[in-house]
Image: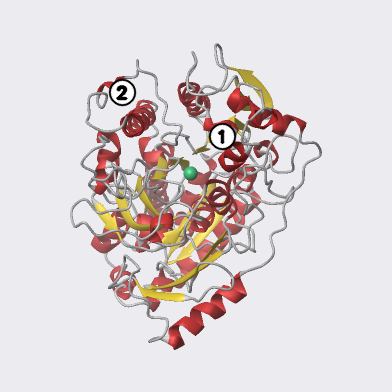
Amino acid sequence: MDSRQLEQENAELSKRIHALSQRIQELERLVRMKKIIHTRTATSTWMLLAILGFSALSSAETVRLNFDPATPQIAFAAGDIKAALEKRKHTVQTHNLAALAEGGSSKKIVRAVATDKSAASILSAQGGKPAAGLGTQAYALRITTKPNVVYIMSDELGYFEPGFMGNPNIRTPNLDRFAAEGVKFTQCLAGSAVCAPTRCCFLTGKHSGHTSVRQNGGGTPLRAEEQTIASILKPLGYATGGFGKWGNGGRGSTGVPEQHGFDVFFGYYDQVHAHTYYPPYLIRNSEEIPLAGNHGGSAGQTYSQYVIFDETVKFIRANKDRPFFAYLPFTPPHPNSDIPDTDAAWALYKDKPWPEPARRYAAMVSLLDRQIGEIMALLKQLGLDEKTLVMFSGDNGGADYFITPEFPRGVHSANKDPKTGVEFRGKKGRLYEGGLRLPAAARWPGKIAPGRVSNHLWYFPDVLPTIAELTGAKAPADIDGLSLLPDLIGEAAAGRKQAQHEYLYWENTGQTAVRMGDWKAYQAKPDAAWELYDLRTDVSERQDLAKTRPEILAKLQAYAKAAHTLAIEGTFSTTVLHQRDRAAKWGGILPWTKAKDGGKKAAADNNR
Ligand SMILES: [Ca+2]
């Protein structure tokens, strides 16, 4: 090689190095901004860029690679990058774009990947922006930091009670905006028809034929070894906080939240304790936190939800720089329908022509709505709006509260469509639709398309696998839930099609229900005749088709038989503190020790 040739090559090389360093700088900038990266270079350079890019990530962040194996060197590179990243202790999710090609319209995506425009459109569908000037080929590489997850679970709020579901009485402007900016679900169903069992399905990803907590007394604990959403997130470095009502194990039991993945749980461990908004104390990680001027019952100086909300805000602020999971099973609007007269929400309803408990209940929903607005504003203020998936739902079906002659389904008619008059049969506690249907919505700017209405059929066991898929956490093998991530963020972004349940299953206090698509089978008690409904044409469950469609019923009965196992509950080492918490509802004096009815009323209350 003569010197002239060498000079030319050197010049060429130095140009390439210059271009490469510019690209690296741009890449590093994008990595710092946590944006999508989209680049065209030779494979080796691409790998170099990628690995340099990842060096800007702190260790143990989840990295997601989307690659197109139709371009063999990319598939090869993706494998190498995955290995390199795993050495650096990253969790790596690889998504094979060709896997999408198996179903219908997705084929277009893989073919389209060969052009710059379509690669950009894929990235845009994933919520990312292609980097200007960085390329024209089909290499799609995406770096995601782990998102925050906030799940707000209202106690008792029925399907038609929030404004975004059409309620004419109750004002929920913040929730209405929340739903409009995200997705509203028409078929989100509870894990069970009452408080504690539904929470167990939520926390563990199991249906109520497999859960440990199937009694609603408030005293049944999770077993010590059971995993929850919080415990699977801990190994990924998540801060985990719960605020509100636990219901899956009292103090002194194997079910306490701080032994199930929660760094902190603040509020009520036991349901009976939660039946006063003025308890003498709340609980943080099994320690009592006194509330000034409170003696249980319906009056006092410190309204518990204010304190629970303040602790929630503190938790979010304290963890703004790391991924967090905030589980917010807030207790409003559960009866006793108590809200301070000084609360701004009471002014909205105090003069309405309804019984006072119905006015108080509406005010509690508006209080909750205001607090949800404040949480959304806080996320925005902390710059977390686009890094946080926020989901909202009720916990069990609506309860037909405040029945009057004029309103046979309750003043606020939780289970009656205010527009059409169509009703869901049953209510809280029953496994007809009225006991299971929940108001629900989710919001995540840039990830969840705004203004969507989703008819995807899902229930509480699906939340754990959804969060697992989203974060790269490892879900336990024995769960019953199915991730709804593709429905939430779109199938292209999730890298797969939305799966549907073969069947959904519930059992509660002797009742059994099974759902397969639009078919629903129901049995009121173990020796009762099975009923069968086609919800597509009969959402009110009035026309029993058990005799006309025996073959469908037989299939659902077989599912029910397979789904049920005996409950294996956790245990208490001592129930002293647990009983103390239950007595705190009445200021510390157990009413059955002096009740004239021998404690019947108190016993009934225990099971609410
Ligand atoms: Ca409830």
Residue 392 coordinates in the image, percent (x, y): 39, 44
Whole-Å distance between the Cαs marked 2 and 1? 29 Å
The disc at residue 336 is none
Q: Nearer the viewer, residue 544 or 394?
A: 544
| Residue 75 in view | yes
Residue 226 coordinates in the image, percent (x, y): 69, 51
Apparent side of residue 578 relative to residue 429 in the rendered image (left or right)? right
Tell me whether circle 2 and circle 1 mark residues in contact (CB < 8 Å).
no
Residue 43 coordinates in the image, percent (x, y): 45, 61
Rate crowding at label 2 as few (under 14), some (14 to 19) or many (20 or more) other CA atoms within 10 Å: many
Q: Nearer the viewer, residue 60 or 29?
A: 60
Residue occupied by mark 2: 346
N-terminal of the pair, mark 2 or mark 1, is 1
Residue occupied by mark 1: 241
Rate crowding at label 1 as few (under 14), some (14 to 19) or many (20 or more) other CA atoms within 10 Å: many
Q: Residue at x 25, y 39 (%)?
A: 177
Q: Residue at x 18, y 53 (%)?
A: 419
Mark toward the viewer: 2 or 1: 2
Q: Secondary structure at mark 2?
A: helix
Disc 1 residue type (three-letter):
Gly
Q: Nearer the viewer, residue 230 or 493?
A: 230
Name the colour scheme. secondary structure
| Residue 246 in view | no
Q: Secondary structure at mark 1?
A: strand
Disc 2 residue type (three-letter):
Trp
